[in-house]
Image (spheres, rainbow, N blue to C red):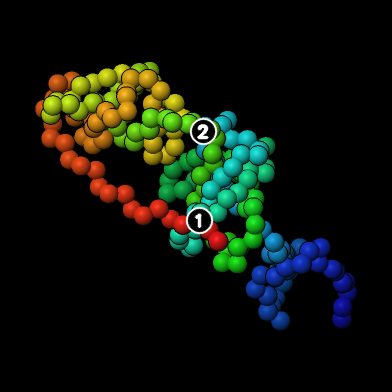
Amino acid sequence: VIQQLGSAPTTGSTTPLSVGDAVTPGEVLFTIAGSGPMVVKAQVDEQDIINVHVGQHAIVTGEDFPGHSLPGIVTNIAAVVLQVNQAGNSAKNVETTISLQRDYSFLRAGMSCDVDIVTGSAEEALVVPLAAISDDGAKHYAFVIKDKKATRVEVAKGLASDTDVVITKGLHAGDVVATTNVKQLKDGSVVKAQPAPSPSPSSSPGS
């Protein structure tokens, strides 16, 4: 006996549902995955959310769609902080929504991905790996390698990503800096420089 009929508010595909499945009152029967560009729900650390704003650009990548970098826009930032416990560690995150700028046929609802949100930009900036910088209290230092000796120099940091940081003072273009064993170095240490590995080919934009 049909007791109630409903109509879908949008066009899309339903999540798995089989005839004869047992349900209980109040249970969600199915979810409609809408058509059109998808959104990404990203968890941003509470200490980083101050730098995130609606309208900023983002790049979405993932192991499920290698070789693709998908452009998106931050469209919503949750008003509350959520506490997440993973592997015995507790973290406080803010759910941030990134809307992709167009539809991609290879994406599926529920896929995992990585998100880089562009919180700032700098032109003709001097960039070094974060591993090259050591901290001593509120000051930051790098070791410049010249004539097989390490010289400790104080630097000022600017914009940073998960792997690199902009140096606004203390280094110059062409300086060779130590990026490994930095904590073991001292001013005047004798070092043997090794060339950095060749970078891997850059990934092509999503199409």
Residue 126 found in image quarter:
top left
Residue 169 found in image quarter:
top left
Label 1, residues with CA under 10 Å away: few <14, some 14-19, many ≥20 = few
Q: CA distance from mark 2 to mark 1?
A: 20 Å
Which residue occupies the foreground of this view, 16 or 186? 186
Secondary structure, mark 2, is: loop
Q: Which residue is mark 2?
A: 121
Depicted 134 relative to depicted 195: above or below: above
Residue 13 horizontal side relative to residue 9, left or right = left
Q: Residue at x 53, y 48 (%)?
A: 59
Kind of residue sitting beneath label 2: Ser
Q: Residue at x 81, y 67 (%)?
A: 8
* Image spot of residue 101 (x, y percent): 64, 52
Q: Residue at x 53, y 51 (%)?
A: 60
Residue 81 horizontal side relative to residue 12, left or right = left
* Image spot of residue 154 (x, y percent): 31, 18
* Image spot of residue 39 (x, y percent): 64, 54
Any mark on residue 205, and which?
Answer: 1
Residue 192 horizontal side relative to residue 32, left or right = left
Label 2, residues with CA under 10 Å away: few <14, some 14-19, many ≥20 = few
